[in-house]
Image: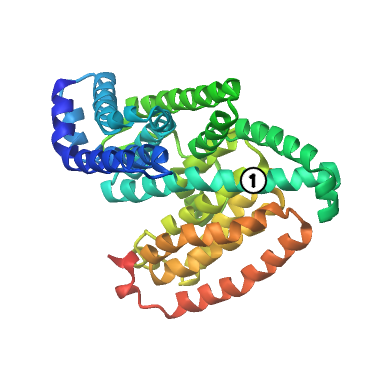
Amino acid sequence: MRALFKLETRRLSVFVLIALVLTLITLLADVEISPVVPYIVLGFLLSSVFPAGLATGLELILSKPFKRIEVFVGFLLSHMLLALIVVFPALVKPTAFLYAIFALPFLPLGYLTAFLMRNPKRTLLVGTLVFLILTFVPMGYIDMKVQNDAQKILGIKTLADYESKKAEYSHLVHALERRYGNYAFFSPGVQLELFSRDLGSEDMGDAYLRVGITIGFTVLLLSLSLLIFLRFEPGDFLRPSIPAVYFRFLPWWVRKEVAGLWASRAFFVFLIVLLLPVGRIMKAFFALFLLPLSVIELLSENPLLILSKPVGRTYLIRRFLVISGLFALFTPVLGFSLPVVLFTATVAFLTGLFSRKLALALLPFLALIISPALQEESLLVAFLFMVLILPFIALAYMRAMRMELGRWEGAR
């Protein structure tokens, strides 16, 4: 463990020093938002910077006669000690130190990202996106949901209705925020926001609950990341048997996509999301990112190898349709949100035929722009998005027919 601590200290010394200086400056300065700074700084370190180094040298570490649980605990203690150095100046303002506690879940989340990505640059990028999304997006969704539900319950339709029921409306909103905040246990941003409001209203009972939820979620993620690490092989995962071998009655090209989807990291995460005790809309929100990622993954296969078989270029479109059809099996879970998810995947697929890197870069912005449509849950909106999918599939077909495979990213 001491050797791992020395290794991580040398590797992360520059990042820790920069983070320490930023925390110290903002805390000592007379800045109103300074208590949040340790959480922001620590969140970036724990979610992306610290885990990004796991892929580097892990093959050498695991090839030595070390017990895997000792290696995992060594990394964990090293990162926790370095994080403590960063937030130590926050003791000047105890509120800032308490805020920093809510960044703890991002460390095991970062480990899971590193195990799935197996690439330092991807871990850094995806970890940063996870931190930003879980910090800012769920609370915004909860605010919209709470206001909409409170207005429906109280029958508020005009400004006069609001003025006459202002006190009752405020009390109901507060109660709904607490309830939905319990559902959003996976979002440190939600728990931090509710914790800060509890401190302002001196509601210490709910404040302790927010801290307990955050620590409990951290322990759950640490347990999951440890279980995966114990089965982790450098460069890949140990996976169960591919289910496609049991579907001999299907055409070979369908079974190939079933196998590819089963090996997909994005699909593996999607299966975990399905098990979470969250609502349909939240699961659809995760699928809004995970299905396009699965589609982009299929484009990573060298098209020259694909087209060397007795198939035409339309095979690329056929592969996309098969994956979309497989995700359509989850219609009972996603409901009317499925066409919205499929539309996002179609746009990502079309963009990926030009550049996979561009598709990955645009995906977060595209998903966040389209995500408000998930709240509609109406047949009309679902039908509209199904109609919008058709021209994008036609454009993808035209692109597949005319693109120069030798210069496409998938050919390298």
Task: Classify 10 Å Cα crowding around label 1: few (below 14), some (14-19), many (20 and above).
Answer: some
382 lies above or below 89: below
Q: Quadrant of residue 105?
A: top left
User: Can you give x and y, in whole percent of width and height, for residue 300 in the image?
Assistant: 37, 59
Tell me if 227 is positioned left or right of 392 in this view: left
**Residue in front for this viewpoint, 266 or 79:** 79
The residue under label 1 is 143
- Residue sitting at x 74%, y 64%: 383
User: Can you give x and y, in whole percent of width and height, for residue 336 in the image?
Assistant: 71, 53
Q: Quadrant of residue 71?
A: top left
Q: Callout 1: helix, strand or loop?
A: helix
Tell me if 412 is positioned left or right of 360 in this view: left
**Residue in front for this viewpoint, 189 or 184:** 189
- Residue sitting at x 70%, y 43%: 146
User: Can you give x and y, in whole percent of width and height, for residue 197 in the image?
Assistant: 57, 34
Name the residue type under label 1: Asp
**Residue in front for this viewpoint, 399 or 74:** 74
| Quadrant (top left/top right/bottom left/bottom right) for the N terminus | top left
User: Can you give x and y, in whole percent of width and height, for residue 392 in the image?
Assistant: 57, 72
Is residue 315 visible from the viewing direction of this image? no
Tell me if 361 is positioned left or right of 251 in this view: left
Tell me if 281 is positioned left or right of 401 in this view: right
Question: Could you tell me how many numbered marks the image carries?
Answer: 1
| Quadrant (top left/top right/bottom left/bottom right) for the C terminus | bottom left
Q: How is the image coloured?
A: rainbow
Is residue 122 visible from the viewing direction of this image? yes
